[in-house]
């Protein structure tokens, strides 16, 4: 079946009990057992819930994986994956990462005796050099946040495999519509379903997908033991979002390319980062491993922090806010918002300058979006 059909049907068969066409919200914590040791497959909702199971089946199918697990947030999904490591283990990670992931590595798991080394995600040779005897995991985000760097998933999978480590890819930015890391050799995919999978800025969620049974069992154990599961109602919202994922992603992608080209030609812009632009260093790699380039565009505004601040303040349609991947356009200032937990020196080393603005391009009409940007740029000029 094709992606559009999978998005609507996988895990979402009519309810066997009533015929309900949408998966019911099984708002229950427990299930009647027919006798000692005789369950109908459900025992307690932390362990398993039919609405969550539908979502897990759906996300697994979208990623082309055998097993899916849903979590209360993207961070909960990441925590469960990292929790399969042991004290003394080492992780190599791409250095263009979601700020919260970096914080989880450095401020939570480092205290538990796990160490992390960062290397440019787009350079498999440098990633390889960062490996140590005790490296158990290679963690990449691609396209990464906020510079949209592209990691070579297949080459990185080879690096990890040759060192007996597993490759985890955070596929939040591409969404399964544009990229399937498992098919390129990744061992596990993580998602913040809060973003494109949910798609409407109204629900938090996370997911892990793998085709490796042993890995699935380990992460499932963490899901049950740690308990960061999503509520049935939240699973239902993500499922509803997923049905329109392909249509939304096509619009996000087309609008983002339009916005990126507009920005590239604008005199107030110092630099634009979008993998769909030929000028992007990861462009050809993105063409080879993705089916589109996503909806996030990052730019540097000429004139430093003050200019970026004025530009953001002048935007009317793009709402200043954290997060991304919803139908409405958002603007964010990585240095003070999403990446504020990264120390300033480290942030600059990664290229996250104070004049950087990240746009999550929504699915409004593209002309209204570029008009808003145009107007905001003209106000910086007037104000300075
Ligand atoms: C938002 C995000 C996360 C964290 O997900 P939450 O749902 O906010 O916990 C992880 N990775 C990426 C790339 C994200 O954008």
Image: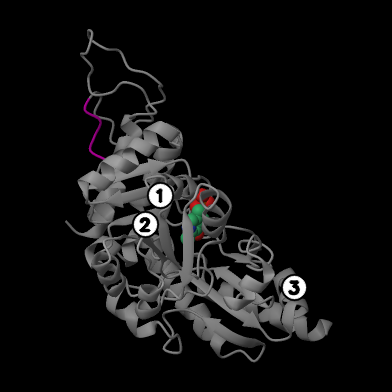
Find residue 35 and report its horizontal and vertical position in percent.
22, 7
Residue drawn at 58 percent across, 86 percent down = 271
Q: Which residue is mark 1?
A: 241
Residue drawn at 63 percent across, 64 percent down = 342
Work out whether residue 281 can be spotted: yes
Q: Is mark 1 within 8 Å of ligand 1?
A: no
Q: How many marks?
A: 3
Q: Which residue is mark 2?
A: 245
Contact (Cβ within 8 Å) of mark 1 with mark 3: no
Find residue 113 and report its horizontal and vertical position in percent.
49, 50
49 sits left or right of 354 in the view? left
Please give the label number shown on residue 309: 3
Residue drawn at 38 percent across, 30 percent down = 25
Contact (Cβ within 8 Å) of mark 1 with mark 2: yes
Give the secondary structure at mark 3.
Answer: helix
Residue range in magenta is: 12-16
Q: CA distance from mark 1 to mark 3?
A: 33 Å
Main secondary-structure element of the magenta-colored stretch: loop
Residue drawn at 44 percent across, 34 percent down = 226
Q: Is residue 383 above or below residue 327?
A: below
Find residue 181 and report its horizontal and vertical position in percent.
29, 64
Q: Is residue 9 magenta?
A: no
């Amino acid at each position: 079946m094709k992606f559009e059909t999978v998005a609507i049907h996988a895990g979402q068969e009519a309810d066997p009990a009533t015929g309900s066409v949408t998966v019911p919200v099984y708002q229950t914590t427990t299930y009647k057992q027919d006798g000692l040791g005789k369950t109908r497959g459900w025992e307690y909702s932390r362990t398993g819930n039919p609405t969550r199971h539908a979502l897990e089946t759906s996300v697994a199918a979208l990623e082309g994986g055998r097993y899916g697990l849903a979590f209360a947030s993207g961070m909960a999904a990441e925590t469960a994956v990292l929790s399969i490591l042991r004290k003394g283990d080492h992780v190599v990670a791409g250095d263009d990462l979601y700020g919260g992931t970096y914080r989880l590595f450095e401020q939570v798991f480092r205290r538990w005796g796990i160490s992390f080394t960062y290397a440019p995600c787009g350079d498999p040779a440098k990633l390889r050099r960062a490996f140590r005897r005790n490296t158990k995991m290679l963690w990449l985000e691609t396209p990464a946040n906020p510079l949209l760097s592209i990691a070579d998933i297949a080459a990185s999978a080879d690096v990890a495999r040759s060192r007996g480590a597993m490759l985890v890819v955070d596929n939040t930015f591409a969404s399964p519509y544009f990229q399937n890391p498992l098919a390129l050799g990744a061992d596990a995919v993580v998602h913040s379903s809060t973003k494109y999978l949910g798609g409407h800025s109204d629900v938090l969620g996370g997911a892990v997908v793998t085709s490796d049974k042993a890995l699935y069992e380990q992460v499932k154990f963490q899901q049950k033991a740690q308990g960061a599961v999503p509520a049935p109602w939240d699973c239902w919202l993500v499922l509803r979002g997923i049905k329109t994922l392909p249509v939304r992603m096509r619009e996000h992608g087309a609008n983002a390319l339009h916005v990126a080209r507009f920005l590239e030609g604008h005199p107030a812009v110092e630099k634009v980062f979008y993998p769909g632009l030929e000028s992007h260093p990861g462009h050809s790699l993105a063409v080879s491993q993705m089916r589109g380039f996503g909806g996030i565009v990052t730019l540097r505004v000429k004139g430093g922090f003050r200019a970026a601040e004025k530009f953001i303040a002048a935007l009317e349609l793009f709402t200043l806010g954290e997060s991304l991947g919803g139908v409405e356009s958002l603007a964010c200032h990585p240095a003070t918002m999403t990446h504020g937990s990264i120390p300033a020196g480290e942030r600059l080393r990664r290229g996250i300058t104070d004049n950087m603005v990240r746009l999550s391009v929504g699915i409004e009409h593209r002309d209204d979006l570029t008009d808003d940007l145009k107007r905001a740029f003209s106000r910086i000029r007037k104000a300075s």
